Image (cartoon, rainbow, N blue to C red):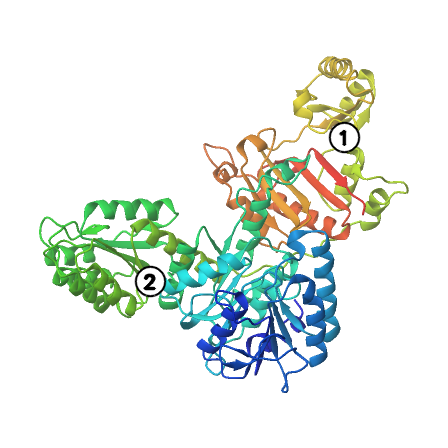
Amino acid sequence: MKQDRQKGLDGLFRPRSVAVVGASRRAGSIGRQVVSNLIRGGFTGPVYPVNPKAEVVLSVPAYRSVAAIPGPVDLAVLVVPPDAVLAVAAECGKKGVKGLVVITAGFREVGGEGIVREEKLAAISKRYGMRVIGPNCMGIVNAEQGYALDASFSATMPRPGAVAMVSQSGALGEAILADAAQAGLGVAMFASVGNRVDVTAADLLGYWENDPNVRVILLYLETVGEPQEFVEVARRVSRKKPIIAVKSGRSDAGALAASSHTGSVAGADVAADTMLAQCGVLRVDNFRDMFALAQALLDQPLPKGPRMAIVTNAGGPGILATDAIAGLGMEVAPLLPATEKALRKALPVEASVRNPVDLIASADAARYRAALKVVAADPTVEGLVVLFVSPVMIDAAAVAQAIVDETRGCGRPVLACVMGRQRGDEAQRILRDAGIPVFRYPEDAATTLRQMLRRTRWLERRPARVPDFRVDKAAARRILRKKGRASGWLANAEVEAVLAAYGIPLPASRRVRTPGEAVAAAHELGWPVVLKAEAAELLHKSEHRAVRVGLRTGDDVFAAAADLIERLKGKFPDVRLQVQSQAQGHREVLIGMTRDSRYGPLFAAGLGGVLVEVMRDVSIRVGPLDGKDPQEMFERLKGAPLLAAFRGAPAADVATAADALLRIQKLVVDFPEIAEVEVNPFILAEKGKRSVAVDGRLRVEHA
């Protein structure tokens, strides 16, 4: 992402003066609320209400126009009717305004004339070098000392803090600020970006990258309108600061319309999810989880690994915590024998000294102190969940203070769950004031720990270089850009030639038209052979029983060839045959790419063969892939153990398939007209023997 995308954003977030165009004296109006927020928030520079029909707005002198303002204006907030926005924006440009916040709606979101209006607003912004937030937004906030800018119509005044937020929705922006305040989360900056005519989420990520006041970044996204820019900047920024996102649209039924298996399993939300994960962005399901995770990342260290300890005074919550931790891919840490021995000395005989450590219902502050002192010192423990159900006879505040005292400085994340009302509010306050996140239920604490562990893994991972493959680009170009080439699927022979030009291993084969020619080809290739029917419209051979394997005699080949031709020629008049040496591998996988209009190339790796759409065990990643990605994609399949050695069968040569996927990436980068390409199945042999792509398809789509 170019650095100049952050240029000029100070004019929005750090202005010396602000004009509110459309300021109103009418109670309940947005124009009045913006002026009120600027004054109430303590903005340190002059505020200029602009209203041609009012002399004063909220005791502040008003001006008839932006041009009539005597001093310079850095930021203008536009709350005027949509048909007046363009004229006001041009007037601001002539005045030398550096940034616009266009709260007015009625642009791209309404279609037709609104789209044209938005394009003209973008042109005005570019002509005058003004940065624009919106249109159709709620405004912006900067709580930084010396600015105290609340240029929004939010009813909530956020308290200063270390979190920066982006909301694509103005209405949800109000709820986000209100819920953040209720959760005790302080805000450094906030932006409701609306239609993103200029400033995008990617721009703001880059702007906050080196801002010392911002330690955690929160995003609410409905779409990612600039995925390549977003990927570039988010990958860089997330190495320095956590980025947490709520991305709506999980139930998008408009998954990619594709004829390949790759396209049918790579739905729109799968693409968004994998893109965020590849950027190190922590995607959560809701704002409650977002705020809890943000607080934990602000106040607690990251876990070094997955082994968690649970200390509780009630068996039920302890079991819930155990199930949640194990169910989310973490471990309940096995405590050292010395730890269990020390716990046995400190706790009553009825207590459980194994993890989860159950102090039983009578546990008071002294018992919590004794247990936590021991558990927090166990080197096998990499995170700690402390549960407390508040009985009437136990001082909850004293227990909370014991948790704070005995875990302070332990170097591992500590999360608490307080259940019950007996002085529970005071206990929660003590824990939160000490930086220990408090949850209502154990499952929520486990969810936050899992996300913290994901961040640990992201920071540990270092990208690997993609090999510099030697390929025959000219040979592929002759086929893909053959004169008169129309959009559509390539013939099988052409697909194989393109794949071979890029180093994808293929079995030896011959193409024939008659059963007799098939027998002759089989003798030439050697036994056993595979016989396949081919036709322009025959994409999924298994659906038409168009493949015969394990043919070992001329009679078998002749009979199979005759049957295929006779049975398929009615539906596929151009049917012909391919005789192929039978691969000697023992596992089938799929690799491929489908090009998405929003996210670019989506690469797939999964278990292959005819069951791919039934099992849907496929890993998807957004390009570009690095040298580690393909191997990791195979490792994260649910069926990954099937590719390893088991029951006497040797491990499959996954490395060759991973190499082939990187070669496919090079192919689709070299030829952007490739819309889909897939190899299925790619038959993997054991290591040291030859793995081959036995079937492939490729579709081109010309602009």
The residue singled out by tag 1 in the image is 509
Residues at marks 1 and 2 touching, judged by CB atoms closer than 8 Å? no
Earlier in the chain: of badge 1 and badge 2, it is 2
Assign a secondary structure to mark 2.
loop
- Which dot marks residue 413? 2
> Where is 81 relative to 663, above or below?
below
Q: Is residue 461 left or right of residue 696?
A: left
User: Measured from the top left, where is residue 254 in percent x and y?
Assistant: 62, 40
User: Measured from the top left, where is residue 162 in percent x and y?
Assistant: 43, 71
Name the residue nearer the viewer: 380 or 283: 283
Name the residue nearer the viewer: 13 or 238: 13
- Quadrant of the rendered image containing residue 258: top right
Q: Residue at image x 63%, y 56%? A: 227
- Quadrant of the rendered image containing residue 437: bottom left
Front tag of 1 and 2: 2
User: Measured from the top left, where is residue 582 in percent x and y?
Assistant: 68, 28
User: Measured from the top left, where is residue 46 in percent x and y?
Assistant: 54, 84
Q: Residue at image x 23%, y 50%? A: 356
Number of other residues with Cα within 10 Å of mark 1, as a class: few under 14, some 14 to 19, many 20 or more? some
Q: Is residue 112 left or right of residue 51?
A: right
Q: Residue at image x 74%, y 67%? A: 123
Report if residue 79 is visible in the image.
Answer: yes
Q: Is residue 139 left or right of residue 67?
A: left
**Amino acid beneath label 1:** Ser
Assign a secondary structure to mark 1.
strand
Number of other residues with Cα within 10 Å of mark 2, as a class: few under 14, some 14 to 19, many 20 or more? many
> Where is 348 relative to 563, above or below?
below
Quarter that holds the N terminus: bottom right
**Amino acid beneath label 2:** Pro
Name the residue nearer the viewer: 475 or 201: 201
Report if residue 294 is visible in the image.
Answer: no
